[in-house]
Image: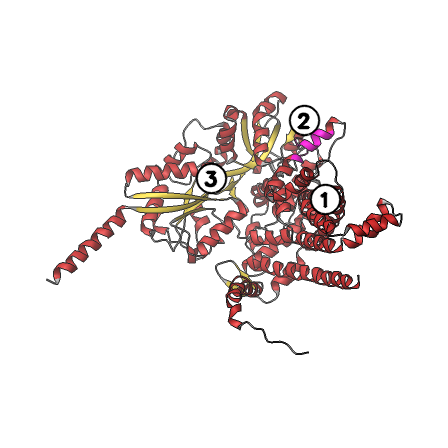
Amino acid sequence: MKLIPSAALLAAFALTAGLAQADTVLSVLADGNAETVAALDALTKAYTAAHPDITFEIETHPGGADGDNMVKTRLATGEGGDIIQYNSGSLFQALDPVKNLADLSDIQANVIDSFKTVVTASDGTVRGVPFGAAMGGGIYYNKKIYADLGLSVPKTWAEFMANNEKIKAAGKVAVAETFGDTWTSQLFVLADFFNVQAEVPNFAADYTANKAKYASTPAAMRGFEHLEEVFKGGYMNEDFGAAKFDDGVRMVATGEAAHYPMLTFALGNIKQNFPDNVNDVGFFAQPGPDAAKNGLTVWMPAALYVPAASKHVAEAKAFLAYVASVDGCNEMIKANGATGPYLIKDCKLPADVPPSVADMLPYFQNGATAPALEFLSPIKGPALEQITVEVGSGIRPAAEAAGLYDQDVEKQAKQLGLPNW
Amino acid sequence: MTRRRSPYPYWFVLPAAVVFTVLFLVPTLASLWFSLTRWDLFTASFIGLDNYRQFFKEPFLVQGLVNTVIYAALTSVSKSVLGLLLAVLLTSGILWQSFLRAVIFFPVLVSTIGVGITFTALMHPTRGAINIGLAAIGIHGPAWLSNPELALYSVAFIDLWKGIGLATLIYIAGLAAISPDYYEAARIDGATRVQQFWRVTVPLVRPATVTVVTLSLIGGLRSFDIIWATTRGGPGFASDVLASVIYKQYQAGFYGLATAGNVILFALIALIILPLTWWFNKREIDL
């Protein structure tokens, strides 16, 4: 008689366990960008269609530094949910991945090696899968203005400045700057890194080891000087101090301005807000001193991670394995179009990409790319965007700004507790 | 002097003491501890006074401190002077007095972030209503919030616009407390309106002045929301105040350093406000 209740109990257990398994809800924490949400929606819907027992709950957080703090707080309190979408590179390292994120080394079969390095924790394990396409940092240009004035794409900084002079002489805004969103002011410095490493190959390592400084490395200081030259030339829009990212996109797309230094994810905004102008916008890498060494500074996309405290690590990993497959990659292309190369082996872009993407691909095919400094070094001074606003607005000279940024970098390195600082 | 025993038992204080300890005392002590550590939210390691050393080395700290004092003094003085003048006007029995009182007080009720966003649009250098209006009368208006020389003063003006209603309200209450007998006596002695203002109103409205100056000075010293909503301390660092310098350390993930900054802000406010209240109270006894 005693057997029966325990058997019933067992059956009940099996039933509830079965139910629980049948109804796994994975929570996803992601930034609120329209493109991020669109890609996540497409991926999760396709996955639920193939695995009806798995559903998703997507929660968004603000972008920028406020989002960083929210993600860190969630992870620190064990409330990170099951999947987190977050930056790769130095921001990923600041999450203390060995302690807080699950090991994803066994689902990397389709991931291109260059991406694995930017989501590898200090113990050598890989903790994330790529989410989205790689981006370039460079200069968007308005093809109509270039055609009207008979200009050609510059291969050196001097040619770029000569173009600016001609555009200004024609009565147009040569360079759109949008310091109302301070982060956009950093582009001339950050996107110059291909040129820095072409001249000083060891810069990233020496900089991390406290041996190389911006102020004492002429190649590294050039980015600050470029900002200063563009300001002194009077090439910028009148409201540069108040204009925002969306204004910059509008100006270069509609021909109000000829150039806009930006990351290539801006294509998504051009497509959304100015669909008729997509074919008027081209893109080139930030030119350096030498036409023979012309190349593109590349930003790796964000990644998806599984918090170590998740109750559904196995299910979340199965989903991430799908994201890191050719099928998952195609789903993302379908959702957002091709904005750049994906980091999944054998994931092909469609043939009819917009001109600004087509302009970017040759750099990848010719191997003329270098990762941005934030993927090679954990140190990025937090005040860079304020300092670049100062240089770009003529408040502080370039040389002084580079020295000031070195101090900011020192603070960051000390707060990270790095050796040699 | 013998102290009389309180008729109430000590455990009456317990509920309040628990709330005070949990919500105020423990966090204050914890922040003192964390200000001595390198803290990334995941782990905290003790580094002694390094955070304080780093904070005082911060290149924009000095400018931030100067800006904080300028901003607090400017908003506090202008709120008390203009607040008093408006209060005198609005108690003088002018037409639509109650309606105008409501209009002056209205901005106090609006959310600070909303005010900040609205003024950012109004003060836009090319598309803002202010500069479009100025252009109509032939003046090329400056970039109110993105000119480094002007930004701090533009924000102080917005703060004044938003905060003056409260100062006026306090002054109206203060004026109502002055007995009409004093004015009558002054009039019999042949005092003009201006003399009445300086000899009767200003001295007798002192308690209201103390309240307005203290409140607006504390508010100015720790002001953050309106600055963050309009300039974020920019352009560059031109309108940074202590609170925005601290917030940026927090944003950068330097939690220990930001906490040390808060301890310093706490000390600074105490250093300015304590002597000031002591001085005000002393004068009040003299009066």
Q: Which mark is residue B106?
A: none
Q: Residues within 10 Å of mark 2 (few under 14, many from 20)?
A: some
Q: Is residue A225 above or below residue A354?
A: below
Percent position of residue A370, x then y? 52, 43
Was residue B128 drawn as part of the magenta stretch in this picture?
Answer: yes
Closest to the observer, B77 or A420: B77
Q: Amino acid at mark 1?
A: Tyr
Q: Depth check: A251 or A161 in front?
A: A251
Q: Residue B232, image x and y in percent?
A: 63, 45
Highlighted magenta segment, given as a residue range: B122-134
Instruction: Chain letter for mark 2, please.
Output: A
Residue type beneath disc 2: Lys
Query: Hey, which quadrant is residue B283 in on the image?
Result: bottom right
Badge 2 is on which residue?
A166
The residue indicated by pointer 1 is B153
Q: Is A109 a magenta residue?
A: no
> Residues at marks 2 and 3, common chain?
yes
Pick whichever, B102 or A249, lies toward us. Answer: B102
Q: Quadrant of the N terminus of chain A?
A: bottom left
Disc 3 to disc 1: CB gap under 8 Å: no
- Graded by Cα atoms within 10 Å as few (under 14), some (14 to 19) or many (20 or more), the crowding at tag 3 reads some
Distance between the Cα atoms at labels 2 and 3? 33 Å
Q: Residue at x 18, y 54 (%)?
A: A11
Type of amino acid under label 3? Ala
Give the residue pinned by disc 3: A134
Secondary element at tag 3: loop
